[in-house]
Amino acid sequence: MKLVLLGSGGYFPNRRRHTACLMIPEIGVVLDAGTAAYQIQDHLQTESLDLFLTHAHLDHVFGLTCLLNLYNGDGAQHIRVHGQAEKLEVIRRCLFNELLFPVAPPFRSVPLASHFDLPEGGRLTWFPLEHPGGSVGYRLDWPGANRPGHSLAYVTDTTARPDAPYLKHIQGVDLLVHEAYFNDDQHEMAELTGHSCVTAVAQNAAAAGAKRLVMVHMNPMCEADEPLDLTKAESIFPGLVVAEDGMTLEF
Ligand SMILES: [Zn+2]
Ligand SMILES: [Zn+2]
């Protein structure tokens, strides 16, 4: 299965990265609707789309206002946006207030149930993350009957700590996509803003036994080729990858 990182940055778009939007085109699943969400149309392979929001901060939901572009053509697209009920309510009431956006939301809102059945025998589950206002992480598993299973976890907008409760939900995951907003010298800002420092992310990925680690949601104020100092993190989790927009990962 292919995961496309349409938007790999955090907070606001810069010249290198749009904000959070991940897509698995062959099953019509999208994780977060940041500023990259206008690109969903370029990868669409399915009749319907299930879009799962981690939370309602603007860098994760702005792109909901771009989904009208999916209505061009035959108008037969069915778009469901899943998230915590209170976040969906705020999005409807505020982001789609007619003074901000004059058209009704081009999707159906679906409060998160305990799990969601995915095509090809998969299952999506979610778990809470510590962040101002709260965020949720997602795990997608396809247990293989006669072959090794494959799995993906998406953890963004939270602080990686050795005792983080989310660790038990990402154990043994094949592909971990985890935010890494700050370098290690900004750990106080990370705590304050509910984000993660790069080495702590590598430590948590290793502690969880993740097989691969991709870092997203980097600080947009850094537009350098290497937005993170990976010196320590790479020794803890060799082969880790810092995401770029448009990157496609097989899992
Ligand atoms: Zn964010
Ligand atoms: Zn946030």
Image: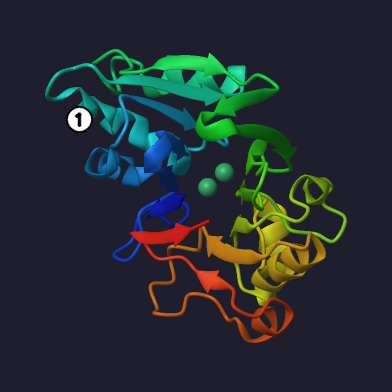
Residue 37 image position (x, y, % from top left) = 33, 41
Q: Residue at x 44, y 51 (%)?
A: 3
Taking the image as shown, residue 188 lies to the left or right of residue 32, namely right
- Using the image, determine if residue 56 lies above or below residue 226: above
| Residue at the outermost right position | 163
Q: Is residue 8 visible?
A: yes
Q: Residue at x 39, y 59 (%)?
A: 248
Task: Tell how many labels.
Answer: 1
SS of the residue under disc 1: helix
- Using the image, determine if residue 180 lies above or below residue 80: below
| Residue at the outermost front position | 146
Residue at label 1?
Answer: 69
- Using the image, determine if residue 240 lies above or below residue 41: below
- Using the image, determine if residue 222 lies above or below residue 232: above
Residue 239 image position (x, y, % from top left) = 59, 78
Residue 25 image position (x, y, % from top left) = 37, 42
Taking the image as shown, residue 152 lies to the left or right of residue 110, namely right
Q: Residues within 10 Å of mark 1 (few under 14, many from 20)?
A: some
Which of the 4 quarters of the picture holds residue 222? bottom left
Taking the image as shown, residue 74 lies to the left or right of residue 7, namely left
Which of the 4 quarters of the picture holds residue 144? top right
Q: Residue at x 77, y 63 (%)?
A: 209
Q: Check disc 1 and give the amino acid type.
A: Asn
Taking the image as shown, residue 125 lies to the left or right of residue 117, namely right
Residue 96 image position (x, y, % from top left) = 36, 19
Q: Is residue 89 visible?
A: no
Residue 32 versus residue 55: which sits nearer the camera?
Answer: 32
